[in-house]
């Protein structure tokens, strides 16, 4: 790994380590956003092993300092949720740019990373943005879905799964179908896909 990439990832992880929310992983308490970032990187290594540095940084910084803007700081409505997400993407991109500059990345690489964090180019078929979207969906399905599905009724969960599926590429679909899920989660995915 190039020294500038290693330094950027280290600085991003230092920020993630400040997340006050903790999860227990293999018996150890870990800041949630650090865990999330590590999961994102783990899936990137499987989905796109030859990823560019901008994609590696965008993946690691996907939720950069997200805990500082809690969901309940916006109205608990669909519009509120989308406004919150839009604000976070822009904020996260802006916060990561100075880290990249400090680490010696070019303005072009910094702009590309910012565009990826903001998920620009997804509808236009940008392959790196699609990889990021696939990975975010895989982490949701693998790491968050089981707890999440218990909070909503089945119809709503199925709709969320269908929306998640539409965002993914065929490669993302293949990886998602290979995930180890609980029986209940497998049933919900089957219903969402019409199986």
Image (cartoon, grey):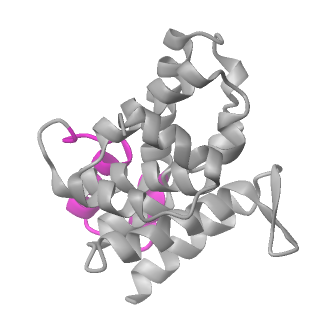
Position in image of residue 18 (x %, y %): 76, 57
Q: How many marks?
A: 0
Screen quadrant of the C terminus: top left
58 horizontally vs 73: left or right: left
Screen quadrant of the N terminus: bottom left
Does residue 172 show up? yes
Residue toward you, 36 or 74:
36
Q: What stretch is highlighted in magenta?
A: 96-122
89 horizontally vs 27: left or right: left
15 horizontally vs 39: left or right: right
Q: Which residue is drawn at 33% across and 69% down?
A: 47
Residue toward you, 194 or 55:
194
Position in image of residue 67 (x %, y %): 70, 41
Residue toward you, 1 or 178:
178
From what the image shows, is residue 186 above or below residue 151? Answer: below
| In magenta segment, residue 35 | no
| In magenta segment, residue 104 | yes
Q: Which residue is drawn at 66% across and 32% down?
A: 69
Position in image of residue 186 (x %, y %): 54, 49
Does residue 113 show up? no
Q: Which residue is drawn at 63% across and 52% down?
A: 183
Magenta segment, prevailing SS (helix, strand or loop): helix
Residue toward you, 6 or 107:
6
- Where, by quadrant of the figure, is residue 10 drawn? bottom right
Position in image of residue 113 (x %, y %): 32, 56
131 horizontally vs 68: left or right: left
Q: Which residue is drawn at 19% across and 41% down?
A: 121
């Amino acid at each position: 790994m190039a020294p500038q990439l290693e330094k950027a990832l280290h600085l991003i992880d230092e920020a993630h380590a400040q997340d006050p929310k903790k999860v227990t992983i293999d018996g150890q308490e870990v800041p949630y956003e650090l865990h999330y970032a590590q999961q994102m990187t783990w899936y990137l290594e499987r989905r796109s092993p030859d990823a560019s540095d901008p994609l590696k940084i965008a993946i690691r910084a996907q939720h950069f300092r997200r805990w500082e803007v809690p969901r309940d700081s916006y109205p608990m409505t669909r519009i509120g949720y989308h406004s919150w997400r839009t604000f976070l993407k822009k904020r996260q991109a802006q916060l990561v740019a100075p880290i990249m500059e400090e680490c010696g990345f070019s303005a072009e690489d910094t702009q590309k990373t910012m565009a990826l964090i903001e998920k620009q180019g997804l509808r236009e078929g940008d392959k790196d943005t699609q990889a990021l979207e696939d990975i975010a969906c895989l982490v949701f399905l693998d790491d968050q879905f089981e707890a999440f599905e218990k909070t909503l009724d089945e119809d709503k969960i199925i709709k969320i799964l269908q929306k998640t599926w539409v965002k993914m590429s065929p490669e993302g679909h293949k990886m998602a179908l290979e995930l180890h899920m609980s029986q209940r989660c497998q049933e919900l995915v089957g219903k969402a896909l019409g199986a």
